[in-house]
Amino acid sequence: MIRDITIGQYYPTGSLLHRLDPRVKLSGTLLFFIAVFSFRGICGLALLTIFLAANIYISKIPFFYMVKGMKAIAVFMIITAVFQIFLTNGQGVIWEWRFLHITKGGILAAVRMVLRLTFLVLGTSIMTLATTPNELTDGLEKSLRPFQRLHVPVHEIAMMMAIALRFIPILIEETDKIMRAQMARGADFETGNLLKRARAMTPLLVPLFVSALRRANDLAMAMEARCYRGGEGRTKMKPLKYEKRDFIAYLVLFVFFAAIFVLRYVNAP
């Protein structure tokens, strides 16, 4: 399961989506998240699905490589769906026992929540798989530049978020190495129920935290050795510049977002 996490990794394919300006991809991801929590009805769901499928196709990233990242949150999604089914009040009671009950509204709420979580994970995966950490840093810093007038440390915030994203695959790889080393010494992480397997993961925490702190210290020393002093006065080797395809992408995003809200009010009760 650890090796199935794809968020934070970069998958180069040279597709049109990879060549877009990172500011376009950040804006598109934000608008997609808003649309995920705003859609209503079958038509809105169909539009979201078509938009997501089109982005996956354009990115040329293998679909199964992207979907395998869902395994990491499968248990969370199941628990969320169970709570929605048994604890959501609504009309059309199907089964009831004491405070537990299953209603048509609860089932619909569970399906809607699972779909939203799926769309959120896939949308985030597309952005990180199609954008390098350096591009994410530059795009985020450029997008937040107006906040510098309010003395917000934009460069430092963007750098921290980029480092956090970059550390995800590194820590996953480190966890995998520690698991393999402990399995060679007789540790068992694969058998037993969910509680037993979670308890078996406990010995991984101490070496993982030690490794993470060591890597963070090495990174801090490397930045100090290179006289890193934040974003003040720094220049870019490859400054971001919008091209024609970026404006077309913004237009597509605007049309998609407007269509989601039109469908939302058309399907309003």
Image: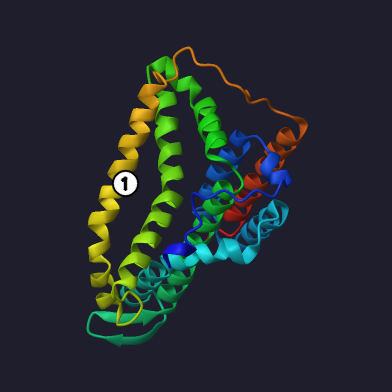
Find disc 1 in the rendering and name its residue.
212
Residue 51 vs 145, above or below: the answer is below
Q: Quadrant of residue 82?
A: bottom left
Residue 160 seen by the camera: yes
Q: Residue at coordinates 46% horizontally, 68% vertically from top-left? A: 71
Horizontal side of 166 relative to 83 (left or right) equals: right
Q: Residue at x 42, y 21 (%)?
A: 226
Residue sitting farthest toward the front:
185
Residue 88 seen: no
* Quarter-of-image position of residue 163: top left
The residue type indicated by label 1 comes to Ala
Residue 105 as seen in the image, left or right of residue 257: left
- Residue 38 in percent (x, y) is at 52, 53
Please tell me how crowded label 1 is: few (under 14), some (14-19), or many (20+) other residues with Cα within 10 Å. some
Where in the figure is residue 248, as x and y percent of width and height? Answer: 75, 37
Question: Could you say where residue 117 lies in the image, as x and y percent from the top left?
Answer: 47, 61
Residue 183's place in the image compared with 118, above or below, is below
Q: Give the camera-side residue of 244 and 96.
A: 244
